[in-house]
Amino acid sequence: MSEDNKELIARGIELGKTVVHYGWVPLILFIGWNSSNPKPNLIKLISPLA
């Protein structure tokens, strides 16, 4: 495998790690919100004062 391919794969892995790192909690919150019945308003879900 050439050095360019290795570098491209390494960049892809780093990008994937970043996406998973910052997207995990919002994904879990969305899945929980989407499967709840009745669905709360998004404002009430995000803001502690609402």
Image (cartoon, rainbow, N blue to C red):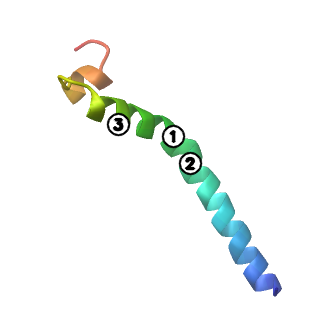
Quadrant of the rendered structure where residue 49 is? Answer: top left
Crowdedness near tag 1: few (<14), some (14–19) or many (≥20) residues, C-alpha within 10 Å:
few
State the quadrant of the C terminus.
top left
The relative height of residue 23 versus residue 11 in the rendered view (above or below) is above
Quadrant of the rendered structure where residue 45 is? Answer: top left
Quadrant of the rendered structure where residue 7 is? Answer: bottom right
Q: Position of residue 41 (x, y in %)?
A: 18, 25
Crowdedness near tag 3: few (<14), some (14–19) or many (≥20) residues, C-alpha within 10 Å:
few
User: Residue flagged by tag 3: what amino acid is it?
Assistant: Phe
Sooner in the amino-acid sequence: mark 2 or mark 3: 2
Marks 2 and 1 sit apart, C-alpha to C-alpha, by 6 Å
Sooner in the amino-acid sequence: mark 3 or mark 1: 1
Marks 2 and 3 sit apart, C-alpha to C-alpha, by 15 Å
Residue occupied by mark 3:
30
Q: Residue drawn 35% across and 30% down?
A: 32
Q: Position of residue 16 (x, y in %)?
A: 60, 58
Residue occupied by mark 1:
24
Q: What number is the disc on residue 20?
A: 2
The relative height of residue 45 versus residue 35 in the rendered view (above or below) is above
User: Residue flagged by tag 2: what amino acid is it?
Assistant: Val
Q: Residue drawn 61% across and 60% down?
A: 15
User: Residue flagged by tag 1: what amino acid is it?
Assistant: Trp
